[in-house]
Amino acid sequence: MPKNDENSEENKKETRATSNNTFGMGPNAWGRSRPLLVATGLTRGIGRALVDAFGDKVTWLSLQRATASESSLPASVEVLPWDLAAQASPTRSQALVSALKGRPVWGLLHCAGVLGPVGGGVKGFEEALRVNTTSVLDLFETLVNAKAFSPREEDARPPFVLHLSSGAALSPYQGWEAYCTSKAATRMLFRAWSTRFSAKELVVASIAPGTVFTDMMKSVLASSPLDFPAVQKFHDLQAQGGLVAPEVPAQAIAALLFGDSQSYAALHGTLFDLRKGVVAGA
Ligand SMILES: NC(=O)c1ccc[n+]([C@@H]2O[C@H](COP(=O)([O-])OP(=O)(O)OC[C@H]3O[C@@H](n4cnc5c(N)ncnc54)[C@H](OP(=O)(O)O)[C@@H]3O)[C@@H](O)[C@H]2O)c1
């Protein structure tokens, strides 16, 4: 089929990419490469399992403290040194934009998280807020300002921003002041973004992974009941087999992102609990 035929498959694809491209990146920059995902928290736990679950469907740019050789990630994962507890700055934003090398971003996944101080107190509270909340605000605004988000080329699926939420965003737990507050703040941040963008422009998703046996969960289980009176609930869950392996939420998240487009778009603005579906009123 000749290239100058406006009905040619190539021209149709190009038009589709341009018309769906809310954030201004040209279709040529997208090329035919795998969609790029910018992510935090890939070094361990649920984030690490996501890398295996997504396989070769995507290219990862991992923002992490450990160097590539220190972390167990596949060599294909690109690494940008990043401490999420550090202050945001124009230099850091520029470093992220440079690392994109002009490539459009299909998604931003904020999988990193810290429990913060257990048992209350001020020490460590601000760090928990930075890692759990402010850092994703910084990353998101940097990518939006750089007009980096773009639909997935193969089906024009809109770009997305996703974070791992928790029941602690909705329910208070004695001793988890920092964790609950930062998780609630992040959830509200995502709700606000879901009013700023339509699902056709950018899918804004909060996903609660369930109770997952990771290093964070090991810290929970190691808590003193004096600091965290609800700790017995987690011991009971463990005894009943209620703590799942990180692969379980990772596979479920992969199914949501790569599955049918209606379910994907329906994530927009919701808090989606992988065990129960959309959490009403959250
Ligand atoms: N596990 C659960 O049951 C559960 C339940 C609900 C929600 N969640 C949420 O799911 C997410 C992942 O939890 P997880 O259980 O997989 O945790 P995890 O195994 O403890 O992993 C935490 C991840 O966050 C990264 N991180 C922490 N502080 C960082 C910093 N300052 N700079 C850069 N990276 C940092 C860690 O990187 P390093 O390797 O460098 O430390 C690691 O990759 C969290 O947001 C958590 O709140 C978990």
Image (cartoon, rainbow, N blue to C red):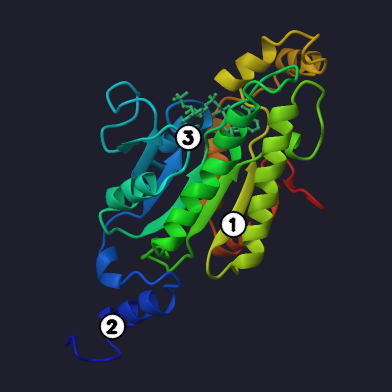
x and y percent of residue 254 in the render?
50, 45
Can you identify the residue that label 2 sits on? 11
The residue that appears at 30% across and 90% down in the rendered structure is: 7
Mark 2 residue crowding within 10 angstroms, few (<14) / some (14–19) / many (20+): some
Image side of residue 232 versus residue 113, left or right: right
Task: Specify few, some or many for label 1: CA neighbours under 10 Å numbering under 14, 14-19, or 20 or more.
Answer: many
Q: CA distance from mark 3 to mark 1?
A: 21 Å
In the picture, the disc for residue 84 is 3
Estimate the spatial distance between the alpha carbons at disc 2 and disc 3, rounded to whole Å. 42 Å
Q: Is mark 3 within 8 Å of ligand 1?
A: yes
Looking at the image, in which quadrant does ligand 1 appear? top right
> Which amino acid type is marked by label 3?
Leu
Which of the 4 quarters of the picture holds residue 220? top right
Which residue is painted at 53% across and 31% down in the image? 46
Nearest to the eye among marks 1 and 2: give it.
1
- The answer to which of 174 and 4 lies nearer the viewer is 174
> Which amino acid type is marked by label 2?
Asn
How packed mark 3 is, by other alpha carbons closer than 10 Å (few <14, some 14-19, many 20 or more), is many
Query: Label 1: which residue?
Result: 204
- Residue occupying image coordinates x 71% and y 15%: 238
What's the CA distance linking mark 1 and mark 2?
Answer: 30 Å
Q: Is residue 59 above or below residue 115?
A: below
Closest to the camera, between mark 2 and mark 3, is: 3
Q: Is residue 228 above or below residue 261?
A: above
Q: Position of residue 102 (x, y in %)?
A: 27, 59
The image position of residue 193, as x and y in percent, is 62, 59
